[in-house]
Image (spheres, grey):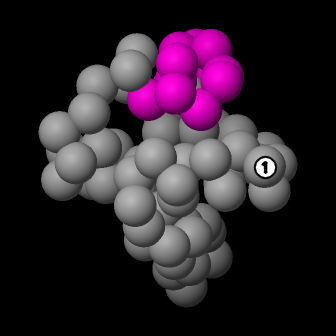
Amino acid sequence: MEIIVNIDVMMAKRKISAGDLADRIGITPANLSILKNGKAKAIRFSTLMALCHELSCQPGDILEFKE
């Protein structure tokens, strides 16, 4: 079982770079990279909310559960 992070997919659909997205949501590009690569142990709801706002999506578009 694992949680798949699809931030890169949503970024490609919205044609936004990692640097721009990081600036818009108020995190460092390094932390965004950790999230994108699935290396994060947790995500703050405020960060998830900012991601959804900037990418015009739902949390389920970013996070996916796989058995």
Give the overall secondary structure of the magenta segment.
Answer: helix
Q: Residue furthest bottom?
A: 67
| Residue 5 rendering spot, x and y as whole percentages | 49, 56
Depth check: give the residue in front, 27 or 32.
27
Residue 66 vs 63, above or below: the answer is below
Q: What quarter of the picture does the C terminus occupy?
A: bottom right
The residue that mark 1 highlights is: 46
Look at the image and give the residue range highlighted in magenta: 21-31
In percent of the image, x 53 and y 58: which residue is there? 52
| Residue 49 rendering spot, x and y as whole percentages | 67, 56
Q: Is residue 32 left or right of residue 47?
A: left
Is there any visible trace of residue 38 in the rendered image?
Answer: no
Q: Is residue 48 left or right of residue 36?
A: right
Residue 65 among those drawn in magenta: no
In percent of the image, x 30 and y 44: which residue is there? 11
Q: Residues within 10 Å of mark 1 (few under 14, many from 20)?
A: few
Is there any visible trace of residue 50 in the rendered image?
Answer: yes
